[in-house]
Amino acid sequence: MSDLIDEAAAATELEREVCIIRAADQIAHPGCIHCEDCGSEIPEARRAAAPFATRCIHCQTNFERRV
Ligand SMILES: [Zn+2]
């Protein structure tokens, strides 16, 4: 039973590390950012205006409408 808990904890830890690596990678390579919703490349103009945007303008608009 405790093995299962350890495995779950390890998976969560790994997931967190992947998130940190991914975030660091995006900061290091802002030119590689793709929209997290549709996967298309975020236009350079938008990245320049919003360097930490994770969505293209269409998905961001939809996202903000949902909220
Ligand atoms: Zn998109």
Image: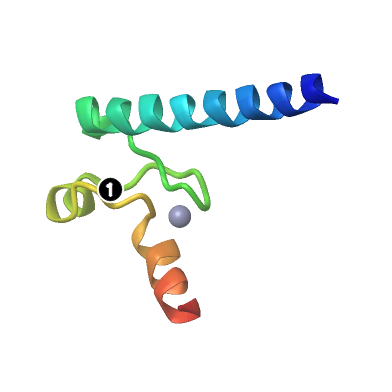
Q: Which residue sits at x=79%, y=23%? A: 2
Q: Quadrant of residue 40?
A: top left
Residue 21 vs 48, above or below: the answer is above
Residue 57 vs 43, above or below: the answer is below
Q: Which residue sits at x=45%, y=25%? A: 17
Circle 1 sits in a helix, a strand or a loop, which is it?
A: loop
Residue 34 image offset from top left, x and y in percent = 40, 40
Q: Which residue is mark 1?
A: 43
Residue 47 image offset from top left, x and y in percent = 21, 48
**Left or right of 34 on screen, residue 14:** right
**Left or right of 26 on screen, residue 13:** right
**Left or right of 37 on screen, residue 52:** left
**Left or right of 1 on screen, residue 46:** left
Location of the N terminus (image quadrant): top right
Q: Residue furthest left?
A: 48
Q: Which residue sits at x=28%, y=48%? A: 43
Q: Which corner quadrant of the figure contains ligand 1?
A: bottom left
Mark 1 crowdedness (10 Å alpha carbons): few <14, some 14-19, many ≥20: some
Residue 62 vs 21, above or below: the answer is below
Location of the C terminus (image quadrant): bottom left
Q: Nearer the viewer, residue 64 or 47?
A: 64
Please name the colour scheme applied to the rendered image.
rainbow
Residue 33 vs 46, above or below: the answer is above
Residue 31 image offset from top left, x and y in percent = 24, 32
Q: Quadrant of residue 46?
A: bottom left
Q: Residue furthest front?
A: 2
Q: Which residue sits at x=34%, y=62%? A: 57
Q: Nearer the viewer, residue 65 or 9?
A: 9
Residue 53 image offset from top left, x and y in percent = 29, 52
Q: Amino acid at mark 1?
A: Pro
